[in-house]
Image (cartoon, rainbow, N blue to C red):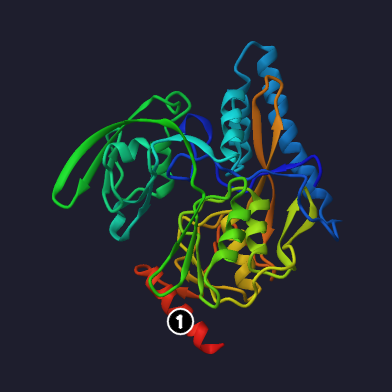
Amino acid sequence: MSGRDLFCQPHRVRRGAALTLVFASVLAAGAATGSFDTPGRKSVSPAARTAQAGHQDDVADAAAEAMADGKSPVEAAERAVSRSGDRWGAVYSQGEYEEFEEALGGRYTGVGLWARRERGGRIEVTRVQSGSPAATAGIRKGDRLRSIDGHRVDGRPVTEVVSLLRGDATDADAGTAVDLGLQRGTRAWSETLHRARLSTDSVSVRELPGGVTVIKVAAFTKGSGDLVRTAVAGAPVDEGIVLDLRGNSGGLVTEAVTAASAFLDGGLVATYDVNGDQEALHADPGGDTTRPLVALVDGGTMSAAELLTGGLQDRGRAVVVGSRTFGKGSVQMPSRLPDGSVAELTVGHYRTPSGRTVDARGITPDLEVEEGALERAETVLSGLGDAE
């Protein structure tokens, strides 16, 4: 894969047209540069390769023509992407893309707020990052998020909520304000927060009273895979592990594979195609294959997180508990446009080891649970331990 940057996560299209799918406004999306294991590569579809190459050329040509005419190449490229029907295609200005790449290292501009959609369409805060604008304002886990900049969020898809939190290309910088309507019990109030440059806490670890270790992966930023491996190595011997991927919008594909290597002794994690070429992702040998493992997922589990979930499920390594995942199984590749902006276009799709397609389908848990998923995971782990 040398020379290729692959992205495996939904992104926002500029001007608010599409998605940033990490609630803290992380753009931690999924570049994997020159680090895929690619044995058995073969060309499978010259027609598909030609069509995808044509798509890339059309976008580049539109940008070049606009630049020659003194018009905005970014806007022209966006129109070309929209006409192509590429659901996950996006165009970034040079500055936006620099911010995007910086986020791969675990930094982002936002307010430090995570949330999810609960039953009935309510949006509830699930985590507040320490030291963030949200924490300084006194927002807590469990608070209800009612509105963002005057837009009511009840019943909205989580993707729209995140887009509102993130802001569009004109107001997503550090220091820009976002007005939140909140509720805690019977108290309703408003807070004006100012977005700030923050570092992501991509992996957190805690031990439950019974000895079960919960490893929460918020996004697959650089280094997160090794953090998962370290957490597994440091977990109490003979106790189960919950790998919590709820709300994980994806990230670096290679980091997801490294995380899989913590639980597998080598072998296939996923396959994918890029411009008609099929390739494979393999775990490193030496992972813990005996400790009971439950993977927690929900509708916010996306892309690289789905790749990891599908690999563990198909390999019989984890019992998957929660609700159906998002269903984003496509791969994007960025290309530089004449003015320095970047078009990120869909070039292929990935499949689980058994050949299942994830895109638009998601992954169905082994045990579907809407509420009390962590408690059910503990019960499952207890049963797995008894069965050994």
Measuring from the top left, give residue 236's x and y in whole percent: 52, 71
- Apparent side of residue 161 relative to residue 75 in the rendered image (left or right): left
The residue at 47%/71% (across/down) is 321
Measuring from the top left, give residue 167's x and y in whole percent: 42, 32
Res. 242 in view: yes
Specify the quadrant of the image occupied by residue 2.
top right
Where is the C terminus found, in terms of image quarters?
A: bottom right
Res. 358 in view: no
Measuring from the top left, give residue 282's x and y in whole percent: 74, 62
**Residue indicated by mark 1:** 382
61 or 324: which is nearer to us? Answer: 324
Specify the quadrant of the image occupied by residue 146.
top left
- Apparent side of residue 233 relative to residue 241 in the rendered image (left or right): right
Q: Would you call the spot at circle 1 few (<14 residues within 10 Å), some (14-19), or many (20 or more)? A: some
| 236 vs 44: above or below | below
Count of number-bearing discs: 1
Extreme residue in the top direction: 70
Residue type highlighted by circle 1? Ser
The residue at 61%/42% (across/down) is 86
Extreme residue in the left direction: 186
Extreme residue in the bottom direction: 387
Measuring from the top left, give residue 286's x and y in whole percent: 72, 68
| 288 vs 231: above or below | below
192 or 107: which is nearer to us? Answer: 107
The residue at 33%/39% (across/down) is 134
| 78 vs 223: above or below | above
187 or 157: which is nearer to us? Answer: 187
Q: Secondary structure at mark 1?
A: helix
